[in-house]
Amino acid sequence: MSEHIIPSKIYYAIWIGLMILTVVTAAVSFVDLGPFNTIVALLIATFKALLVVLFFMHVKYTSEKLTKMVIVSSLFWLLLLLFLSLADYSTRYGHS
Amino acid sequence: MSDSPIAVEQHEHRPELRHHFATVEQQRDSATLGMWLFLGTEIMFFGGMFCAYLIYRIWYYNEFAAGSRSLDIYLGTTNTIVLICSSLTVALSVRAAQLGKRGLVIILLILTLIFGLAFLGIKGVEWYDKYKEHHIPGSSFDAGDLVREYPQLHIDQSHEQIYFSLYFAMTGLHALHMIIGVGIFVYLLYHTWKGLYTPAYNTPIEIGGLYWHFVDIIWIYLFPLLYLIDRKPLR
């Protein structure tokens, strides 16, 4: 794999997108969406993280499959930690 | 990537290529993979805290909501924007290094350091505000102001202390990573200044950049989780 030099305008576009999403997520938090406030905030954060990983961290342009496997498996273990812990604690008595 | 004997020949002429790698591409891919493995352990490191946060937030939602309201959303948003700007300068510095523009790399690395230190400065102001409000967990902790401000939330002070413990632990660990990041970038700046990086060899800037972007991503999650829990008008 030879390294891929990304046009700088892509970096600027991602940067503008991240700035807009930051302002949007702060503004939306003042609107009453019920339980969807948290969901919207996390979706925006995940989308921002995805932009950083794919473009700033060059994962979109890497042909090294091992790198992608490390990232996906790291996230898998994180989700395992969060979901199994949640499954335990949210089904106990004494707290709701 | 070529497997021809020429690649072996290059060893004589390329001081940046370590002898156990066949090509510079292979060397760079190995370094990148190693950095991602490290970031994988970092995900689990922060993951434990995110997990603790998740469980306590479900248990003590009202206290988390009140604690979140007591943070300064303007400083928090400003800091998010500062970090995003620093990620842009890092991404551009990696590109400039690939193109061999040494002067531009130096300017972008200095800008990154300024943004990083600005983030830490703003964070310090926020922590000092919390100190003045007696919101730092410990013997002088007092969330009476929040109890009076939000009577409808029925705040338990010891549960409120858990929110602030997690707030300081998570932002503190993140700030520690920022301080380490500043150290890494001072090192990269020094080596760029000495002209050690070329279009053929700039892997340290690339993987230093990966670290910086990762710390940015942690903040991208910390910002909504700590500052934006519940900002809507209380009924």
Image (tube, rainbow, N blue to C red):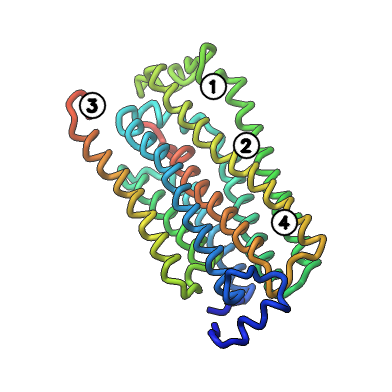
Which residue sits furthest top? Answer: B139
User: Residue sitting at 68 percent across and 75 percent down?
Assistant: B200
| Neighbourhood count class around disc 4 (C-alpha, 10 Å): few under 14, some 14–19, many 20 upward | many
Residue under numbered circle 2 = B123
Q: Are marks 1 and 3 in contact (CB under 8 Å)?
A: no
Task: Name which residue type carries label 2.
Answer: Lys
Q: Position of residue B131 (x, y in %)?
A: 60, 22
Mark 3 vs mark 2: same chain? Answer: no
Disc 3 on helix, strand or loop? Answer: loop
Residue under numbered circle 3 = A95
Identify the subunit bearing mark 1: B
Q: Are marks 3 and 2 in contact (CB under 8 Å)?
A: no
Task: Name which residue type carries label 3.
Answer: His
Q: Nearer the viewer, mark 4 or mark 2?
A: 4
Q: Are marks 3 and 4 in contact (CB under 8 Å)?
A: no
Mark 1 vs mark 3: same chain? Answer: no
Residue under numbered circle 4 = B188
| Neighbourhood count class around disc 2 (C-alpha, 10 Å): few under 14, some 14–19, many 20 upward | some
